[in-house]
Structures are given as C-alpha cells and as structure tokens.
Image (spheres, rainbow, N blue to C red):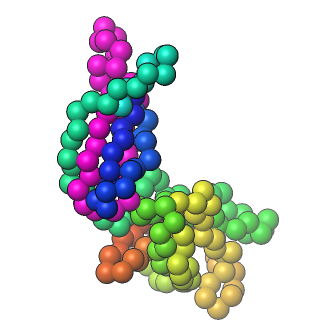
Amino acid sequence: MEIIGKNPEGLDIDPVLADDVSQGSQEPWSLWEIDYLPPTSGEYVLSIRVTDRAGNAEVYEELTVDFTVSLGFKDETYCWPNPLRKSQGEIAHISFDPNVSNNETVDITLSIYDFSGYLVYKKDYPRMQAGRTDQIVTWNLNNDSNRSVARGIYIFRLEANREDENANVIGKILVVE
C-alpha cells in the first residue's frame, strides 16, 4: 500500500510506502501509517494505491489535505564521538537534518558555549543543501582565537535560517583529556 497524489502545483508526488501497524487479532493492514513530510506548504490531493501480489493496482479514496510546513529539525541532532579526547586530536561532528525539502538550501550557524554560557566558538555554514546524507558540521575543539579549549561540558547550538524563518536546536559535548 502506498500514498500517491498531487502537490500544490498539480505535479505528482513520489509514492510513499505505508507501514502495516495492525497488531494481534486485527486484520492485516487494518491499521497503517505513513511517514511523509511535504516539501512545501499548500493543498495536496492524496490517494491510497493498493497493489496485489499479481501486480494489479487499485486507487482508493481521494483526500484533499492542507499542509503547513515550517522550518525546524527532523529526528535527533547529536554530536559524535562524545565524549571527545583532546589528547587524541578528536573533532566534534554534529549531525542534523533540517525540515526542508530535498535540494533546498538553508543557512546554518554553529555556536559553542562553555558551561557558564560564554560563547567560545561560532561558524556560519551558508547555503547548505538539504536532503543529503552527510548533514554534518564540525568543531576542532578550538575557540575563536584558535586556542584549544579546556576540558569540560560545552553546549552546541545549531541555528537554521531560511528567508524569514529560523529554528534552533541545542545539545551537549563533553571534552576530556
């Protein structure tokens, strides 16, 4: 089973496979769900397409849905490795996934604060392309003066900016010797 349909511009969307989440004594496919993030806001016309084992397909139930998409972060934003060992020259890799359509660009700012809230490092990553598997920014454990930071707990803040929208997410980094 999959969801098919048209986007606000009237173009076909890529089919989205549904997952069977029916349990126990329920009939198979009596309860299902999809994971679909529309790339833009607007009115979508969606249908359910069911294909049997012989390859015969039938389309059911056309539904008009009005989606509003705002900038944010999908899934978890995290630092790896964590903790980081300065003595081994490790670099912080911060993975993230902005809530924008594939191939759309977004400006990212990475800010690193010490535990008292003092900004020790800041770097801009303009026009990062979304929809890639390597959405990563890095920090080499140096401050803005290019000096090695002390061991301790640091807070990272990623800010995404697109036109007049922005979103941010925070996390922790532990730096050890």
Inspect the magenta stretch and tell me whether residue 43 lies in it.
yes
In the image, which residues are magenta?
A: 19-48
Tell me, yes or no, if residue 52 can be seen here: yes
| Residue at the extreme top of the image, as rendered | 25
| Residue under the image location 63 percent in, 71 percent down | 138
Vertical placement of residue 109 versus 144, above or below: above
Q: Nearer the viewer, residue 23 or 84?
A: 23
Q: Nearer the viewer, residue 160 or 68?
A: 68
The x and y percentages for residue 85 are: 72, 63
Instruction: Quadrant for residue 149, please give it.
Output: bottom right
The x and y percentages for residue 126 are: 53, 81
Name the quarter where the C terminus is drawn. Answer: bottom right
Vertical placement of residue 171 versus 48, above or below: below
Q: Is residue 161 left or right of residue 165?
A: right
Prevailing SS of the magenta stretch: loop
Vertical placement of residue 11 versus 49, above or below: below
| Residue under the image location 47 percent in, 69 percent down | 104
The x and y percentages for residue 43 are: 23, 56
Name the quarter where the N terminus is drawn. Answer: top left
Tell me, yes or no, if residue 175 can be seen here: no
| Residue at the extreme right of the image, as rendered | 88
Inspect the magenta stretch and tell me whether residue 132 lies in it.
no
| Residue under the image location 52 percent in, 78 percent down | 127
The x and y percentages for residue 40 are: 33, 62
Instruction: Quadrant for residue 147, please give it.
Output: bottom right
| Residue under the image location 54 percent in, 70 percent down | 129
Q: Is residue 169 left or right of residue 147?
A: left
